[in-house]
Amino acid sequence: MTRIVLATHNQGKVAELRRILGDLDVVGLDEFPGAPDVAETEPTFAGNALLKARAIAAFTGLPAVADDSGLCVDALNGMPGVLSARWSGRFGAAAGDRDAANLQLLLDQLADVPDERRGAHFLCAAVLVTPDGAERTVEGRMRGTVIREPRGTGGFGYDPIFVPDGETRTTAEMSAAEKDAISHRGKAFRELAAVLPEALAAAGRS
């Protein structure tokens, strides 16, 4: 069985990828002490994911999968985008709950934006990098609307203020399975899962 390293210490993400990839052996960075902590310095989601996957493939000698994702708001010209996780900057860090600070800052910035202009999408770039340098990149999107008050206790980040198109609930009000079925991450990783066997076989022949 092919072992694949997911470039994260988040066991929830590891479990999610294991569900999607099925018969592949997926492990996280907890199994590789000393693995580099890669700074996300690129201006695109795909660029940041590739930074992480390249570093981990080189460190472990195994095929590596990484992703980067965020919320892109139409009225903010696609921001917070790649800055989604650190949108509130040092103020969020000082507050101790960066997710809550990011969410509140975004709501404040959209306070005067009418409902019909509060469209947004989540975007996820997922990549595979093999030790010989082969790379595959896929993307998944989830369109929706940013509402005015948080609802729900599930998920994380901006989930409590995002209602996907065709839904009345926020992604924080959905079960994990319901969210996975329509989410940007779910779409990206399912697409990556579809090309993984071919990509790994090609890497093995090179």
Image: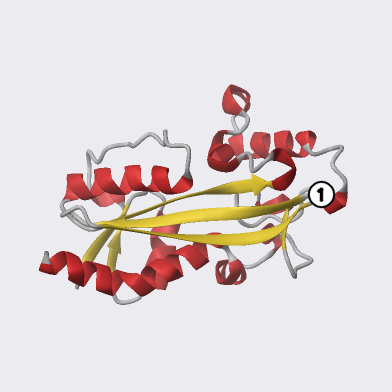
List x then y, in percent, for residue 173: 71, 62
Name the amino acid, label 1.
Answer: Arg
Question: What residue lies at 60% left-to-right and 35% top-to-bottom?
Answer: 98
Q: Secondary structure at mark 1?
A: helix
Q: Is 169 situated above or below 111?
A: below
- Whether residue 157 is visible here, answered yes or no, is no
Quadrant where the C terminus is found in the figure: bottom left
Left or right for 67, reference 32: right
Q: Is 206 situated above or below 1?
A: above
Question: What residue lies at 15% left-to-right and 52% top-to-bottom?
Answer: 61
Residue that numbered label 1 is attached to = 117
List x then y, in percent, for residue 66: 37, 52
> For mark 1, does the 10 Å Cα neighbourhood hold few (<14), some (14 to 19), or many (20 or more) residues?
few
Q: Quadrant of residue 181?
A: bottom right
Judged from this view, the residue extending furthest toward the bottom is 23
Instruction: Depth check: give the residue in front, 71 or 7.
Output: 71
Instruction: Depth check: give the residue in front, 155 or 51.
Output: 51
List x then y, in percent, for residue 199: 26, 68
- Whether residue 183 is visible here, answered yes or no, is yes
Left or right for 96, reference 196: right
Identify the image's colour scheme: rainbow, by chain, secondary structure or one colour.
secondary structure
Question: What residue lies at 75% left-to-right and 64% top-to-bottom?
Answer: 169
Q: Quadrant of residue 109?
A: top right
Question: What residue lies at 84% left-to-right and 41% top-to-bottom?
Answer: 113
List x then y, in percent, for residue 3: 22, 64
